[in-house]
Each structure stands twice: as C-alpha cells, then as structure tokens.
Image: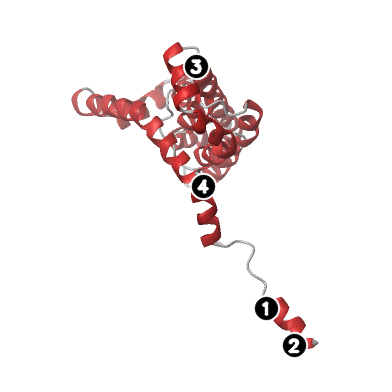
C-alpha cells in the first residue's frame, strides 16, 4: 500500500505543462491573434518613429530636447506633456518622467500622478479606438473582415493589455487596439490597473539611483 501511494504521488504531473499550453494556444488561435494585433499597431508606430528620427537627425537631439523640457517646464507642464505622450502612442520612455519625479520635492505624489496619468492616457487611447469605429470604412472592415478577430479580442485581449501595462511596450497602442476590437471596457479598466504596479516597481528602482 505504501509503494502504491508513493507511486501515485510521484506520478502526478506538474500543474503547468509548456507543451500542452503551447498546443492549446495554437489550436485556439491565440498566437495568430497576437500576431495580427501586433501588425495592426506597427504602421502608426513606424510613422511616429520615422518622424522622431527625422527631427533627431535634422532638427534637434531628441534626448536633449526631452531633458530640457523636463527641466524647464513647471510641474503641471511636465505632467500635461506626459499625459499627451501616453495618449499619443506612448513612445517617450516613462522612465524619464519617473526620474523627474524622483528629483522633485514630493517624489511619491508626483510618481502617483504620472502613474494615474499613464492609466488615463491609456483610457483615452481606448476610447479613441472605440470612436474610430464610427468611420464607416473602418467599421465595415472590423465587423466583416475581422469578425473572428473580434471574438479573439474578447478572449485574449486582456493578455495584450497586461503585457502593455507591465512591460516597456507602448501601453496606449495596446489600449487603442483593444478599443478598436471592442474589448470590454470594464475588463480593460481592471487589467489596466497593472500600470500602477509597473510604475511602483520602476519608481522604487529608479528612485534608488537618482
């Protein structure tokens, strides 16, 4: 009896099996959904990156311009600038603003404010995506040609939003695509709270260096 019970306990499979998970994601279309979502977000990102590169090489050094703006602008100006950045593709690294918060008189308050503004910027991007559906050609394209993608967005969209919220990827782009694909707003609001976790972690790390 002892041997059989021992064998039973040792024969238990681990709760997470990468091969089975990979097979499941492949069969359910998760990988194709991620790839299609990335492809949709790339064109506007590439356009903005191209514009920034032109400005950087032919007008003014972008890094110096950002540092100068952060240094010279009043607190409300920096916060407004950050909100606009987080709404418009979010390509300016938030770490620059986290470092700025660490050098202010109230670092914790300003860090909390930029975390909130980043969340609100993503929320604004989400609604821009939803409003874009009022464009007849875009609405028809999504409803007819992207019907399967809409179903997948409701199922897997939370993962993309979580990745955008936690990792150094454009959170606003993930939110924009979520809005265009009609990802439920309540689910976005809950998953999007991970943005605060990212700023808390990055803030703790950067504050120890500045």
Lower position in the chain sequence, tag 2 or tag 3 = 2
Mark 1 and mark 3: Cα distance apart in space: 54 Å
Residue appearing at x 44%, y 38% in the figure: 169
Q: Which mark is residue 133?
A: 3
Mark 4 or 2, closer to the camera? 2
Mark 4 and mark 3: Cα distance apart in space: 40 Å
The residue that label 2 is drawn on is 3
Instruction: Determine crowd level at label 3: few under 14, some 14-19, many 20+ residues with C-alpha closer than 10 A.
Output: many
Secondary structure of residue under mark 1: helix
Question: Residue 43, located in which quarter of the rendered image?
Answer: top left
Instruction: Determine crowd level at label 4: few under 14, some 14-19, many 20+ residues with C-alpha closer than 10 A.
Output: few
Secondary structure of residue under mark 3: loop
Lower position in the chain sequence, tag 4 or tag 3 = 3
Q: Are marks 4 and 2 in contact (CB under 8 Å)?
A: no
Lower position in the chain sequence, tag 1 or tag 3 = 1
Mark 1 and mark 2: Cα distance apart in space: 10 Å
Q: Position of residue 166 (x, y in %)?
A: 53, 42
Mark 4 and mark 2: Cα distance apart in space: 51 Å
The residue that label 1 is drawn on is 10
Residue farthest toward the left in the current orientation of the protein? 58
Residue appearing at x 25%, y 24% in the figure: 55
Mark 2 and mark 3: Cα distance apart in space: 64 Å
Quadrant of the image containing the N terminus: bottom right
The residue that label 4 is drawn on is 205
Instruction: Determine crowd level at label 1: few under 14, some 14-19, many 20+ residues with C-alpha closer than 10 A.
Output: few
Q: Position of residue 16 (x, y in %)?
A: 60, 61
Q: Are marks 2 and 3 in contact (CB under 8 Å)?
A: no
Q: Are marks 1 and 4 in contact (CB under 8 Å)?
A: no
Mark 4 or 3, closer to the camera? 3
**Residue closer to the observer: 26 or 117:** 26
Lower position in the chain sequence, tag 1 or tag 2 = 2
Mark 1 and mark 4: Cα distance apart in space: 41 Å
């Amino acid at each position: 009896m002892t041997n059989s019970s021992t064998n039973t306990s040792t024969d238990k499979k681990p709760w997470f099996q990468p091969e089975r998970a990979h097979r499941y994601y492949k069969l359910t279309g998760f990988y194709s959904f991620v790839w299609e979502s990335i492809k949709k977000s790339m064109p506007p990102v590439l356009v903005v990156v191209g514009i920034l590169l032109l400005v950087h090489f032919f007008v003014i050094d972008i890094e110096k311009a950002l540092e100068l703006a952060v240094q010279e602008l009043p607190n409300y100006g920096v916060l407004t600038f950050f909100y606009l950045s987080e709404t418009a593709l979010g390509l300016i690294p938030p770490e620059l603003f986290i470092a700025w918060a660490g050098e202010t008189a109230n670092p914790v308050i300003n860090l909390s404010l930029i975390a909130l503004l980043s969340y609100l910027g993503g929320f604004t991007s989400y609604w821009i995506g939803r409003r874009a559906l009022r464009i007849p050609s875009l609405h028809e394209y999504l409803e007819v040609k992207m019907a399967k993608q809409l179903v997948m967005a409701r199922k897997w969209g939370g993962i993309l939003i979580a990745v955008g919220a936690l990792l150094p990827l454009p959170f606003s782009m993930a939110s924009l695509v979520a809005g265009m694909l009609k990802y439920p707003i309540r689910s976005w609001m809950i998953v999007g709270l991970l943005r605060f976790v990212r700023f808390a972690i990055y803030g703790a790390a950067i504050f120890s260096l500045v």
